[in-house]
Image (cartoon, rainbow, N blue to C red):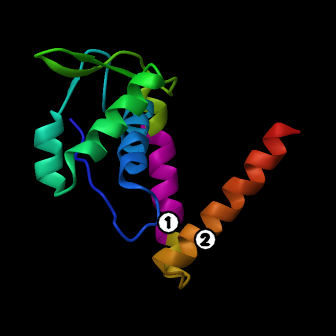
Amino acid sequence: MIEFRVDTGSGVPPYRQLVHQVEHALRLGQLQVGDRLPTVKELAKNLVINPNTVLKAYRELEHKGLAKGRPGQGTFIERALTGLPAEKQAELRAGLESWLTEAHRAGMDADGIAALVATVLAEFRLEERT
């Protein structure tokens, strides 16, 4: 099970943060088809957010076909997102961790690293479309 969190200072609506976290967990294999998500009450209480926010996130996941509510049982993952095998993900993660260590040693702070990664990723997405 993933550990949900909400960053109130991010500028991203909390419900979108929850949706993104589920999508990321599906891509990384941390959630599988059939896994049960926390109840709306549980998650709202743990994150100290309005239950309607959790409900909105779960509805969005249902709209995307990723989850489905079962009356009296909870909300369950219905569909996986395409991802890499765990071994390949581990290999790529190790390379990324090595790069992050190198960037930090070179003097970059977390915000600088995030800015550089965001810029390169945005450029990659543009090139990918052409």
**Label drawn at residue 100:** 1
Q: From the top left corner, tell me how far across and down residue 75 is, in percent.
A: 23, 23
In the foreground, 110 or 88: 110
| Residue 117 appears anywhere in the view | yes
**Label drawn at residue 68:** none
Q: Specify start and end residues of the magenta stretch as a single range.
A: 90-101
Q: From the top left corner, tell me how far across and down residue 92 is, in percent.
A: 51, 43
Element at label 2: helix
Q: From the top left corner, tell me how far across and down residue 128 is, in percent.
A: 79, 40
Residue found at the very far bottom of the displayed protein? 107
In the foreground, 113 or 51: 51
> Does residue 10 sit above or below 41 in this rendering?
below
Residue found at the very far right of the displayed protein? 130
Give the mark nearer the N terminus: 1 vs 2.
1
Residue at 38% in and 71% down? 9
> Does residue 7 sit above or below 77 in this rendering?
below
Quadrant in the picture for residue 68: top left
**Residues at badges 1 and 2 in contact (C-beta under 8 Å)?**
no
> Would you call the spot at circle 2 few (<14 residues within 10 Å), some (14-19), or many (20 or more)?
few
**Label drawn at residue 115:** 2
In the foreground, 46 or 31: 46
Q: If the image is split into quadrants, where does the N terminus sit?
A: top left
Element at label 1: helix
Residue at 35% in and 15% down? 78
Q: Is 23 included in the stretch rendered in magenta?
A: no
Amino acid under disc 1: Leu
Residue at 22% in and 51% down? 50
